[in-house]
Image (spheres, rainbow, N blue to C red):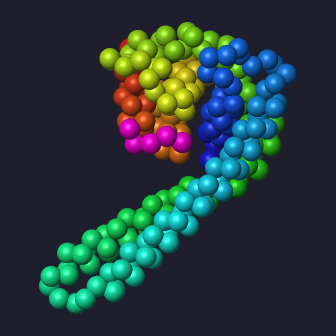
Amino acid sequence: MQSRTLARELALLMLGQVSDRGADASPASFDLLLQQAATSLSQHVREALDRSAEDLQQAQQRLLDSELEDEGEKQLPRVRRHLQEGLSHAEQALNRLSACLELPRLLLLADQEAVRLDAIARTRAVLRDRKGLDSRIDAVMEGWRLTRLPRVDRDILRLAVVDLEDFATPPAVACSEAVELANRYSDEQGRRMINGVLRRFTAARV
């Protein structure tokens, strides 16, 4: 994983430590925010592993349920349903475990000076112009307001716009990185919303 990708993720976690309506963080507090972000990342690893274990237990239970069903054509739909549910839980567990495999290395890379400085720079850029960012994002929301989105989705969008405007990141890369953050920290609805808003935002800049 590239250092900039990790810096974006750390910046997202840093922003999560700052009030969305309160005063901007002071320069002296950025190191503390970064420490808190690393702690949040560690917690995210533990929670993902716990959810993976729960999914594997559910998968095992569904497979066991399918074996306990009486044989016969009348029971086939229930057996099939148990098997499908078991496979679905197993797939979720594998997806989470796959994402978790990268996270311990991220925690080690978070101590690198270049990554730390990049994460702080991105966080500072968002906090410096948060109202302006929100206004420019609102302009392409099409019937929605940024304030209606979950906090994490708002911060992902803010970071993506900063990527485009302050860090000269190619639009395709900025959108892809934002969607990847949404895959990790948001949900399917948030991912679709973020992708659509950024596509309209980049189109409006052309």
**How many numbered circles does the render carry?**
0
Q: Residue at x 74, y 44 (%)?
A: 39
The residue drawn where x is 43% and y is 72% is 59
Q: Nearer the viewer, residue 71 or 146?
A: 71
Q: Is 147 left or right of 46, judged from the image as shown? A: left
Q: Is residue 86 above or below residue 40?
A: below
Residue 175: horizontal and vertical position, in percent? 46, 32
Q: Residue furthest left?
A: 73
Instruction: Verify whether residue 162 appears in magenta.
Output: no
> In which quadrant of the rendered view does residue 12 lie?
top right
178 displayed left or right of 202: right
- Quadrant containing the C terminus is top left
- Whether residue 190 is visible here, answered yes or no, is yes
Determine the residue positioned at 52% across, 37% down.
Answer: 177
Q: Is residue 126 depicted above or below 59 in this figure?
A: above
Answer whether residue 11 is visible to the viewer in this image: no
In the image, is 140 to the left or to the right of 161?
left
Residue name at image x 33 percent, y 17 percent:
142
Q: Position of residue 65 (x, y in %)?
A: 36, 80
Farthest bottom residue? 71
Q: Which residues are magenta?
A: 185-189
Q: Is residue 74 left or right of residue 90?
A: left
117 in relation to 50, above or below: above
Q: Give the percent coordinates (x, y) of residue 182.
A: 49, 39
Q: Compared with residue 61, is residue 195 higher up or lower down, i.e. above or below?
A: above
Q: Position of residue 118 (x, y in %)?
A: 72, 30
Q: Which one is nearer the viewer's eye here, 173 or 19?
A: 19
Looking at the picture, tell me which residue is in the foreground, 92 or 1.
92
Magenta stretch: dominant SS?
helix
